[in-house]
Structure formats: structure tokens, C-alpha cells
Amino acid sequence: MVYGLTRLKAFSSDFALVNQIRRAALSASANIAEGFEREGNREFAQFLAQAKGSVGEVKDELYVALDENYISQIEFDRAYALADKTTRLLGGFIGYLRRTANAGSKFKRPPA
């Protein structure tokens, strides 16, 4: 959704904001992937928290885009709702990982 919005004519001319919001969106997904590949729940939760922070940055940059009239209120509402849902899902997943007794696959012992 971020890439679609930043392709809009008005938005696309603000190179700094386009770069920043795209980097934040990419950072969120990259942190989720990197944390998962670490195969440990504590590390995964840490990377999910970083992803959650990046989504928070996207939310802030959506406000800037709205204030600058780069996006409409409807576009803002849709994108913000998606980002907000993402932060809630990440928060729930972080809580689950911190509560579970399973430490992650990298801590499993091979069969004897």
C-alpha cells in the first residue's frame, strides 16, 4: 500500500518523504523475516518489536502525507487502519512469544 500511495503524482515529488516511508515499510517486513530466521523466540520478539517501531514510523509519515495533501483522507484512513492493525498483530505476537515455554527451534536438542 505504501508503494501505491507514494506513486501518486503529488506524493511522488517529495523524494525525501517517499524514501523515508518506503524504507520504514521495508524495514518492518525485513525485521519480521530476519527475526524468524534467527529461530529463537527471544530474538524473534526483539525483531518484531523493531518491526512494530517501523510501522509506527509509517503511521507518522502518513500524517505528514495527509497534512501536505499528498493523499486524501480516505487513502490515509485505509493505510492508517492497515498499519494500526499490523501494530496490534505484532504486539499480540510479541506477547505470545514472551509467554510461551518454547524457546525456538534453534534450542531444540537433536534426538539421541
Image (tube, rainbow, N blue to C red):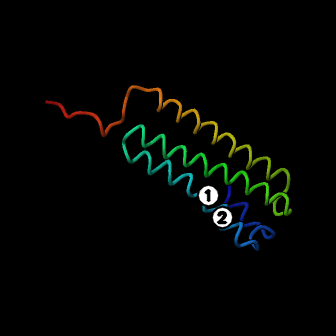
* Residue positioned 59% across, 45% down in the render: 52
Quadrant for the N terminus in the image: bottom right
Q: Residues within 10 Å of mark 2 (few under 14, many from 20)?
A: some
Q: CA distance from mark 1 to mark 2?
A: 6 Å
Q: Quick check: 86 above or below 92? A: below
Residue designated by label 1: 24
Q: How many marks?
A: 2
User: Can you give x and y, in whole percent of width and height, for residue 59 in the image?
Assistant: 71, 51
Given residues 30 and 57, the one toward you in this image is 57
Report whether 73 appears left or right of 20: right
* Residue positioned 55% across, 56% down in the render: 27
User: In terms of secondary structure, where does tag 2 sit?
Assistant: helix
* Residue positioned 30% across, 40% down in the render: 106
Q: Quick check: 112 above or below 30? A: above
Report whether 12 appears left or right of 112: right
Q: Amino acid at mark 2?
A: Gln
Farthest residue to the left: give it. 112
Q: Amino acid at mark 1?
A: Ala
**Which numbered marker is on residue 49?**
none
* Residue positioned 36% across, 42% down in the render: 39
User: Can you give x and y, in whole percent of width and height, for residue 2 in the image?
Assistant: 68, 58
Quadrant for the C terminus in the image: top left
User: Can you give x and y, in whole percent of width and height, for residue 81 in the image?
Assistant: 73, 43
User: In terms of secondary structure, where does tag 1 sit?
Assistant: helix
Q: Residues within 10 Å of mark 1 (few under 14, many from 20)?
A: many
Residue designated by label 2: 20
Q: Quadrant of residue 108?
A: top left
Q: CB under 8 Å between callouts 1 and 2?
A: yes
